[in-house]
Image (cartoon, rainbow, N blue to C red):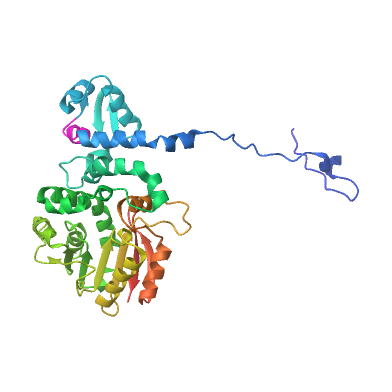
Amino acid sequence: MNTLTLPEPAVAGRPANGINHAHIPPRIAKIPAPTPNHILQTGLGFWASKTLLSATELGVFTELAKGSLDADTLRLRLGIHERSALDFFDALVALRFLERQNGRYTNTPESDLFLDRNKPSYVGGILEMSNARLFGFWNSLTEALRTGQPQNEGKSGEDFFGKLYASPEKLAGFLQAMTGLSLGTAHAIAEKFPWAEYRSVADVGAAQGAVPVQLALAHPHLTAVGYDLPVVRPIFEEYARSHSVANRVRFQSGDFFKDPLPKVDVIIMGHILHDWNLEQKWRLIQKAYDALPKGGAFIVYEVLIDDDRRENALGLLMSLNMLIETPGGFDYTGADCRGWMRAAGFRATRVEPLVGPDSMVIGIK
């Protein structure tokens, strides 16, 4: 019969089991040898980025939303050359934007929902703008870091957003892209904030109106205001009518630096503060505080940088994008925003995650 032998207890002057453990070398953990994989993957990351941007521009995902296709049929419908079509489609498979089975390509669930131009959830508009504009401007990041100056159309005296707002067709497409980006966040705000305690809300910089419309749909007792420049009005009002909430969601035109903000119980600013320098951020936060009643709430949502500034790479890269695009804008941490709110007079502040990279900072007057 096998027996279990227990180690002998150590006795003064004699090591346990008669073994002198002092002469046994310590076990050294094996540390993996460093590799250049992460360096190369990041340094050449623009290859993957441009592949996705070109696929969006070409309409790959919109075409496949109609049904699966073999490579030749897809290539012909998109009007691309046969030389690298297979590499292009299979790269999208490897990047997990397409699926392939028995030689036929289909969208992934995410690509089908967010990259089909015919769906209201389409976020490809922002990718199309990135492809046409930002991809080239980011090539001047080094210059931006050295000079602190924007690297967009302003370098040559052009005004991209002025031209955008002057074209109703382009503006409508841009605002629809903003809606695609905001829908998930709008649903999360509708769910996570205690709306039963409030009666009215204004979204400052409302664009097409995704946030106020979704709040009105989720909470029938709410009335909502979309606050934006006058040129946005017809696009906003059509969006509200299309969701049958025009009786509770109205548009108010204004310039948030020059004009009064709406008098409501809750003011929201989403992806607004990061466009501006610190002094301008303070002004907007103070204007929100002054417009709110006692007990009113101010909600700011952004791709917040983590407080330790180590983990949320997207938030930090977004801040570099503000360097490329604006004279003084920058992204910030939740702790930063809470501090600005307290300085303005808000008595209680907190940070709550929403969906994807977005989080909200809440201040109570």
Q: Residue furthest front?
A: 156
Which of these two is toward me, 77 or 324? 324
Q: Evaluate whether residue 60 shows in this view.
A: yes
Which of these two is toward me, 63 or 41? 41
Which of these two is toward me, 105 or 282? 282
Q: Quadrant of residue 113?
A: top left
Quadrant housing the N terminus? top right
Q: Quadrant of residue 299?
A: bottom left
The residue under the point 28% across, 25% down is 101
Q: Evaluate whether residue 292 shows in this view.
A: no
Specify whether residue 246 is painted magenta: no
Q: Which residues are magenta?
A: 59-67
**On the rendered structure, is 65 left or right of 297?**
left
- x then y, percent, for residue 125: 21, 45
The residue under the point 19% across, 62% down is 212
Quadrant housing the C terminus? bottom left
Q: Residue furthest right?
A: 13
The residue under the point 35% across, 68% down is 279
- x then y, percent, for residue 204: 22, 65
Which of these two is toward me, 167 or 34? 167
- x then y, percent, for residue 157: 23, 50
Q: Residue furthest top?
A: 83
- x then y, percent, for residue 345: 36, 77
Count of marks, rendered view? 0
